Image (cartoon, grey):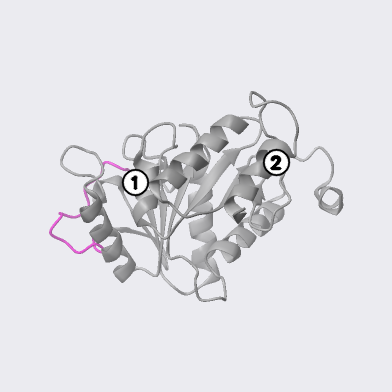
């Protein structure tokens, strides 16, 4: 049994209930990270740092450089988690980080960073780096126009691979915010060409059956699912006591 399958098995069965129930408890698994609504800023930041260290800063030499963040539903927290992970990674390292808004129909990542997604900054003849907007010292944003073809959709797999190769030549890390798996096939397509994928599961909202189907969709596309984030988890008891249970 693979680690990824065990991850979603825990989500589906450890909490009890039917497939129509909604997961709401944190999962005890080394790669699962919880970002809880209402937590103290320091606690939330600590969880995000653990996520970044687990995914990007592994010391075994096989850490991914291109990672897709996607949710299950249309209004998932993937954009927030992707932006937070990017800022944390940039502040934890001197290496350059590029956030990519690949939610072409609803570019929430750009909005979170205060950038107008429709603003044409550079022409397509410019280099990939010049077509990105610098957000901070070593943090950049690639708007949806970078990946979109003339019809406003993702280009062919070959073109997409080349674009991501160019991004990895310009930046050390590339974090891609994709639409939910049940909204379009873009997350699965991006997962095919990126190094890894992280699935965002909304506490008290994402159904177990939907989470399982999302994993199956990503697996079928050949995406490498390295873990899941349980987003908006509320703790009914103090966090330190919760962690001791």
Mark 2 or mark 1, whichever is nearer to me: 1
Give the crowd class for mark 1: few <14, some 14-19, many >=20 residues within 10 Å: some
Q: Where is residue 208? Give x, y as percent.
A: 62, 32
Q: Where is residue 131? Give x, y as percent.
A: 24, 58
| Spatial separation of the CA atoms under disc 2 and disc 1 | 34 Å
**Residue 11, image quadrant:** top right
Farthest-out residue, front: 1
Q: Is residue 121 magenta?
A: yes
**Residue 46, image quadrant:** bottom right
Q: Where is residue 156? Give x, y as percent.
A: 21, 48
Q: Residue at x 61, y 42 (%)?
A: 231
Q: Where is residue 108? Give x, y as percent.
A: 41, 40
Report the magenta residues as a range. Answer: 116-130
**Residue of label 2:** 38
Q: Residue at x 56, y 76 (%)?
A: 60
Give the crowd class for mark 2: few <14, some 14-19, many >=20 residues within 10 Å: few
Q: Residue at x 59, y 66 (%)?
A: 53
Q: Residue at x 19, y 44 (%)?
A: 149
**Residue 205, image quadrant:** top right
Give the tally of numbered discs. 2
Closer to us: 75 or 121: 75
Secondary-structure class at tag 1: helix
Q: Which mark is residue 189?
A: 1
From where the camera sits, is residue 110 visible? no
Residue 46 in the image: above or below residue 220: below
Closer to us: 34 or 6: 6
The secondary structure that most of the magenta stretch takes on is loop
From where the camera sits, is residue 230 visible? yes
Q: Are marks 2 and 1 in contact (CB under 8 Å)?
A: no
Answer with mark 2 or mark 1, whichever residue precedes in sequence: 2
């Amino acid at each position: 049994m693979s680690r990824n399958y065990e991850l979603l098995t825990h989500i589906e069965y450890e909490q009890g209930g039917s497939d129509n129930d909604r997961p709401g408890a944190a999962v005890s698994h080394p790669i699962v990270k919880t970002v809880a609504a209402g937590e103290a800023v320091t606690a939330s930041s600590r969880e995000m740092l653990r996520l970044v260290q687990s995914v990007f800063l592994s010391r075994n030499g096989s850490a991914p450089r291109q990672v897709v963040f996607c949710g299950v539903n249309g209004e998932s927290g993937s954009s927030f988690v992707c932006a937070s992970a990017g800022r944390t990674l940039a502040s934890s390292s001197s290496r350059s980080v590029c956030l990519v808004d690949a939610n072409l129909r609803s570019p929430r990542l750009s909005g979170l960073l205060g950038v107008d997604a429709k603003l044409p900054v550079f022409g397509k003849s410019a280099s990939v780096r010049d077509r990105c907007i610098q957000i901070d010292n070593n943090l950049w944003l690639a708007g949806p126009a970078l990946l979109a073809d003339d019809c406003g959709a993702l280009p062919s797999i070959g073109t997409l691979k080349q674009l991501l190769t160019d991004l990895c030549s310009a930046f050390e890390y590339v974090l891609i915010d994709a639409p939910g798996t049940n909204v379009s096939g873009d997350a699965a397509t991006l997962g095919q060409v990126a190094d890894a994928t992280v699935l965002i599961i909304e506490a008290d909202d994402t159904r177990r059956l939907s989470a399982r189907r999302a994993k199956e969709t990503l697996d079928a596309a050949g995406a490498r699912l390295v873990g899941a984030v349980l987003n908006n988890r509320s703790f009914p008891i103090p966090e330190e006591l919760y962690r001791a249970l």
